[in-house]
Image (cartoon, rainbow, N blue to C red):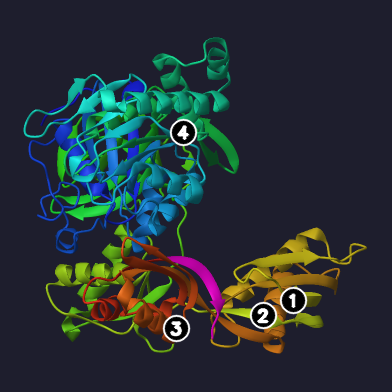
């Protein structure tokens, strides 16, 4: 066992790599590991030799499916890095990772610019307030240009890009960058020479000076102290620029943009320097907030504070159950007992591991700021808070999206039914975005997830666990029901008398449609205290119960309505919160049967990239799938079609598209909500 010294908090960086699928996230991660000396050979996605894409399915498919954590050291800094998936079906994996990260590198394709999933992960990072820097990758590709890529970042993501480098050469001739802060050329000649620092080439000197002046002006507009220096001297020194860029990155007021080619190992060293210089350390962030008995508390990122950590991932290996943990405060040592603050269950930390994807290094302890895996925790799930028993605290878990696609699953052999149930239980434990349930009408076991690929991967994991066939049926989408024609003045009286205290509640409800088809609104216009406030809250709870019970069209979840309690009456002895909650539940169910209802289905925005000659057939196919075309644009001999399509119509679309375009067509999709079923 080897123990690595723990760096001070100011020298730790916890960051994620975020991007659209195929933008080069995993290659960037591999080059970071190689450049920092964490690995001694460059892993390649196309060869299936990457460190972070170690799962057999990831190597077979050539994409990142599961978030993988690795650690490396650079210039006196410990970098804990998580390579996240880029496919929309695995957005929940990104969400759980972002919850425990302090910063991120957003990777963009220099040819494609901002792509659909780039936007999705950007919005996720916005919700978590994660500071970011950008890396425009693949500058060695045909058609690659930095300025159009930066323009797409500005137009579609709306940050203020602060470009700190100028490319040297174009496409195949891309050899390095000009560092606009230091006004030095950073060149990678090729071979084993690595990074070479030189004077700025004469033919780029004028442009470099103009771009540095533009960078100084942009920073001065955003940073008061930099503005003072700019007004006094007409320029900004390198030290002032670095300080201002760091503060603008932390607040999100500006986005530092770097560039390079990860595949050719060009631009990685400056990227690592930028990570250390601009992204925050755990000590730079406000104390983490949690709750205890309903009261908010704070814990500083201090190794001497009481221990508190958040579980963000659970996995199974040959050595046992691994629980991935971000330590927010305090210190935890192997052999110590901790508390699952949410469930009140005690757990024991038998081993602590520093993670290098599928390889691990055992350490004696983990301190505030660390991301580690622990062995010995039996029941904690993703989102659980582990704390010292004497000072419990519940941290806010990552949000979880509702599954939108289901598939019926059954064992190929009847004797494997129990083993299938156990394998599915382990699967759901490792991936909380999957849900397993039994259909009460058909008795089928249904596995629900975020998309077709998500379910394919999940079913394959179950097959591998069982070592035998698993039969699946066509996926079903999760429909909703909504109100399109409401009712007013519905009277419902709930009276129950069966000995002892009875139940009495009298309600008058209006049920109305609203524009937001996925929303629910509740209001009360009762005056004169005819229904006490505590009963009004019970009425709202009962209405929410009724919506979960399902609507009259097929028992689907009901959304898109406003319920107004307009009048009511109570009984001095028999009225209670339970009575009014029950009355509201039964009354709203009766009201929904009288309303005009409509089915809603999940819809996705698809971006289809095809050769120009195939556009007609693709448009016709999308129309046949009840798609609504949003736009069409040409780009480098190809056409990009954007449309909104019902999710149910996309099953099997990838194969159909490949057939129509001789394998040259691709598409991506992202959920955009629900729409009336046509």
Which residue is farthest right?
528
Quadrant holding the C terminus: bottom right
Task: Specify the principal SS of the magenta part.
Answer: strand
Identify the secondary structure beneath mark 2. strand
Mark 2 and mark 3: Cα distance apart in space: 27 Å
Q: Badge 3 local density, few (<14 within 10 Å), some, or many (20+)?
A: some
Looking at the image, is mark 4 or mark 3 earlier in the sequence? 4
> Residue at 63% of width from left, 76% of height from top?
546
Circle 1/circle 3 CB separation < 8 Å: no
Q: How many marks?
A: 4
Q: Position of residue 147 (x, y in %)?
A: 39, 42
Q: Position of residue 132 (x, y in %)?
A: 41, 38
Disc ID at residue 391: 4
Q: State the image coordinates of residue 151 (x, y, percent, origin top left).
A: 45, 45
| Residue 353, visible in the rendered structure | no
Q: CA distance from mark 2 to mark 4?
A: 48 Å
Q: Residue at x 21, y 32 (%)?
A: 72
Name which residue lies at 45% across and 39% down.
130
Judged by depth in the image, the label closer to the viewer, 1 or 3, is 3
Residue that carries the numbered disc 3 in the rendered image:
623
Mark 2 highlights which residue? 483
């Amino acid at each position: 066992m080897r123990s690595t010294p723990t760096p001070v908090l100011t020298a730790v960086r916890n960051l994620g790599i975020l991007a659209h699928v195929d933008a080069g996230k995993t290659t960037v991660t591999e080059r970071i590991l190689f450049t920092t000396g964490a690995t001694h050979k460059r892993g390649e996605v196309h060869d299936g030799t990457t460190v972070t894409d170690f799962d057999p399915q990831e190597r077979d498919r050539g994409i990142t499916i599961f978030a993988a954590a690795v650690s490396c050291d650079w210039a006196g800094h410990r970098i804990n890095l998580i390579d996240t998936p880029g496919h929309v079906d695995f957005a929940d994996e990104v969400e759980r990772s972002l919850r425990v990260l302090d910063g991120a590198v957003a990777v963009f394709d220099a040819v494609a610019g901002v792509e659909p999933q780039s936007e999705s992960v950007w919005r996720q990072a916005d919700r978590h307030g994660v500071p970011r820097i950008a890396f425009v990758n693949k500058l060695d590709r045909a058609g690659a240009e930095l300025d159009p890529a930066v323009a797409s970042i500005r137009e579609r993501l709306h940050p203020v890009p602060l470009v700190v480098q100028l490319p040297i050469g174009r496409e195949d001739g891309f050899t390095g960058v000009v560092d606009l802060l230091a006004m030095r050329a950073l060149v990678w000649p090729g071979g084993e020479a690595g990074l070479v620092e030189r004077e700025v080439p004469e033919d780029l000197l004028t442009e470099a000076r103009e771009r540095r002046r533009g960078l100084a002006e942009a920073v001065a507009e955003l940073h008061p102290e930099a503005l003072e220096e700019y007004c006094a001297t007409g320029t900004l020194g390198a030290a002032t620029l670095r300080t201002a860029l760091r503060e603008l990155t932390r607040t999100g007021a500006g986005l530092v943009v770097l560039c390079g080619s990860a595949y050719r190992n060009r631009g990685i060293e400056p990227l690592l320097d930028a990570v250390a210089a601009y992204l925050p350390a755990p000590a730079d962030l406000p104390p983490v907030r949690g709750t205890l008995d309903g009261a908010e508390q704070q814990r500083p990122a201090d190794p001497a504070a009481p221990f508190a950590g958040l579980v963000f991932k659970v996995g199974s290996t040959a050595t046992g159950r691994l629980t991935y943990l971000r330590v927010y405060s305090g210190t935890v040592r192997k052999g110590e007992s901790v508390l699952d603050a949410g469930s009140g269950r005690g757990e024991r930390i038998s081993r602590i591991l520093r993670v290098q994807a599928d390889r691990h290094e055992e350490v004696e302890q983990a301190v505030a700021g660390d991301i580690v895996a622990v062995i010995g925790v039996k029941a904690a799930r993703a989102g659980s808070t582990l704390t010292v028993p004497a000072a419990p605290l519940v941290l806010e878990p990552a949000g979880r999206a509702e599954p939108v696609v289901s598939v019926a699953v059954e064992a190929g052999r009847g004797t494997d039914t129990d083993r299938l149930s156990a394998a599915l239980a382990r699967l759901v434990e490792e991936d909380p975005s999957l849900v397993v349930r039994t259909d009460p009408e058909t008795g089928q076991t249904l596995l629900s997830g975020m998309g077709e690929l998500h379910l394919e991967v999940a079913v394959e994991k179950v097959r591998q666990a069982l070592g035998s066939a698993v039969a699946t049926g066509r996926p079903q989408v999760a429909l909703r029901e909504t109100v399109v024609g409401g009712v007013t003045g519905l009277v419902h009286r709930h009276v129950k008398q069966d000995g002892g205290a009875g139940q009495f509640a009298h309600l008058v409800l209006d049920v109305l449609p609203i524009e937001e088809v996925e929303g629910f609104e509740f209001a009360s216009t009762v005056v004169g205290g005819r229904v006490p406030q505590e009963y009004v809250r019970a009425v709202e709870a009962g209405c929410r119960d009724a919506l979960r019970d399902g609507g009259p069209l097929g028992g689907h979840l009901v959304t898109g309505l406003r319920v107004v309690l307009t009048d009511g009456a109570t009984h001095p002895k028999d009225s209670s919160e339970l009575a009014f909650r029950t009355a509201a539940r039964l009354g709203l169910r009766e009201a929904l049967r009288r309303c005009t209802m409509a089915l809603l289905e999940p819809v996705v925005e698809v971006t289809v990239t095809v050769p120009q000659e195939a556009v007609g057939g693709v448009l016709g196919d999308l129309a046949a799938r009840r798609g609504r075309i949003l736009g069409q644009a040409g780009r480098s001999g190809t056409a990009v079609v954007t449309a909104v399509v019902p999710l149910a119509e996309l099953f099997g679309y990838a194969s159909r598209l490949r057939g129509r375009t001789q394998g040259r067509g691709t598409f991506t999709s992202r959920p955009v909500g629900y729409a009336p079923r046509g």
